[in-house]
C-alpha cells in the first residue's frame, strides 16, 4: 500500500499502516535545486541525507520518487531541458522507486490543473526526453546497484555545481556525477575515496551514460551534463 502523504511520512511507515508513501519531500528538494536554484550542492546533499535517515533501508528502497503528479505543477514548467534531464538522472539513480507521470517523457508543462492533467500525446515517441528516460530505465533494470544498492556521497563542489555519489552492492559499483554548472568540469576518480579504485591499479571505468572525455583516471565533463560509470 502506497500512501498519499504530502509531508514527512515516517509515522505512517512503522509497519502497521502503509508499505510506502509518495515521496513529496524528494520532489520539493529536487525542484529547489535543479529548477529554482535555491540550494547549493552541499545543501542538497544535506537535505537528501536527512531524508534517507528518516526511513529504514527497506522503506527507503520502496519510497515513490516522482518529479510531479496529477496534483502539482509539472516539473518541466519553467525548467530548461538540460536541468530537467539532470533531475531525471538523479530520480532514476537515487534509492527508491522512480515513478514517471505520463507526459514527463514528452516535456509536458503546466501550472494549473487543466494543463498538468492534459491529455496524453502518442505521436512524439522520438522526443529527446523520451530517449533519455529509456536509457536510464534500461540501466536501472540492468544494474542491481541502481535498484537496491547503498549510496554514498563522493563529490561535492559548490563552486562548479557538481554532485557525485556511488551506488554499490556486492561486486557492483556505479558512480553518478551531475554537473549542473555552466562550465566544463575535470576530476580525478582516484581522489573520490572509492576503495576499488584505490586498492587496485587494475580497476577500470566503463561509461554507461554520458559522453565524457576520459584519460585513464582523469575525466572531463561537459556543462549541464550527467555521467554514469561502472567500476570494475
Image: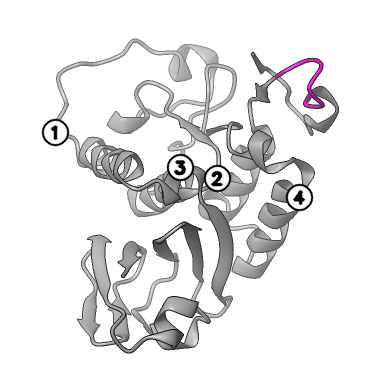
Q: Secondary structure at mark 3?
A: helix
Q: From the image, tell me which residue sits under label 4.
A: 53
Q: Considering only order in the chain, which callout, 1 or 3, is on the residue closer to the N terminus?
A: 1
Closer to the camera, 175 or 67? 175
Q: Quadrant of the C terminus?
A: bottom left
* Distance from the alpha carbon under mark 2 to that under mark 1: 28 Å
Q: From the image, tell me which residue sits under label 3.
A: 147
Q: Secondary structure at mark 1?
A: loop
- Left or right: residue 148 versus residue 46 is left
Q: From the image, tell me which residue sits under label 2.
A: 95
Residue depth check, mark 2 versus mark 1: number of the one nearer the observer? 2
Q: Secondary structure at mark 2?
A: loop
Relative to 190, say whether 24 is above or below.
above
Q: Considering only order in the chain, which callout, 4 or 2, is on the residue closer to the N terminus?
A: 4
Do the residues under discs 3 and 4 have CB atoms within 8 angstroms? no
Query: Residue 62, percent across and down?
Result: 58, 31
Q: Considering only order in the chain, which callout, 3 or 2, is on the residue closer to the N terminus?
A: 2
Q: Quadrant of the N terminus?
A: top right
- Furthest residue to the front? 170
Relative to 38, say whether 100 is above or below.
above
Asked if one can make out residue 79 in the rendered structure from this viewpoint, the answer is no
Query: Residue 55, percent across and down?
Result: 75, 40
Q: How many marks?
A: 4
| Residue appearing at x 81%, y 32% in the figure | 10
Please report the bounds of the magenta region as a residue range: 13-18
Do the residues under discs 3 and 1 have CB atoms within 8 angstroms? no
* Crowdedness near tag 1: few (<14), some (14–19) or many (≥20) residues, C-alpha within 10 Å: few
Q: Secondary structure at mark 4?
A: helix
Query: Residue 92, percent across and down?
Result: 42, 43
Residue depth check, mark 1 versus mark 4: number of the one nearer the observer? 4
Amino acid at each position: 500500500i502506497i500512501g498519499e502523504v504530502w509531508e514527512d511520512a515516517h509515522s505512517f511507515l512503522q509497519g502497521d499502516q502503509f508499505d510506502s508513501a509518495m515521496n513529496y519531500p524528494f520532489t520539493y528538494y529536487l525542484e529547489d535545486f535543479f529548477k529554482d536554484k535555491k540550494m547549493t550542492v552541499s545543501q542538497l546533499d544535506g537535505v537528501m541525507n536527512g531524508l534517507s535517515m528518516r526511513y529504514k533501508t527497506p522503506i527507503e528502497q520502496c519510497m515513490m520518487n516522482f518529479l510531479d503528479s496529477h496534483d502539482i505543477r509539472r516539473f518541466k514548467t519553467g525548467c530548461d531541458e538540460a536541468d530537467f534531464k539532470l533531475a531525471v538522472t538523479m530520480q532514476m539513480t537515487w534509492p527508491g522507486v522512480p515513478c514517471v507521470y505520463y507526459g514527463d517523457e514528452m516535456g509536458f508543462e503546466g501550472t494549473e490543473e487543466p494543463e498538468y492533467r492534459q491529455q496524453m500525446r502518442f505521436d512524439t515517441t522520438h522526443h529527446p526526453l523520451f530517449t533519455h528516460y529509456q536509457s536510464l530505465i534500461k540501466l536501472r533494470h540492468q544494474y542491481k546497484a541502481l535498484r537496491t544498492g547503498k549510496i554514498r556521497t563522493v563529490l561535492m563542489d559548490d563552486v562548479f555545481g557538481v554532485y557525485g555519489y556511488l551506488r554499490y552492492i556486492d561486486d557492483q559499483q556505479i558512480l553518478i556525477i551531475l554537473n549542473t554548472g555552466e562550465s566544463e568540469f575535470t576530476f580525478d576518480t582516484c581522489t573520490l575515496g572509492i576503495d576499488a579504485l584505490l586498492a587496485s591499479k587494475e580497476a577500470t571505468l566503463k561509461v554507461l551514460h554520458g559522453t565524457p572525455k576520459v584519460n585513464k583516471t582523469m575525466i572531463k565533463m561537459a556543462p549541464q551534463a550527467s555521467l554514469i560509470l561502472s567500476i570494475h
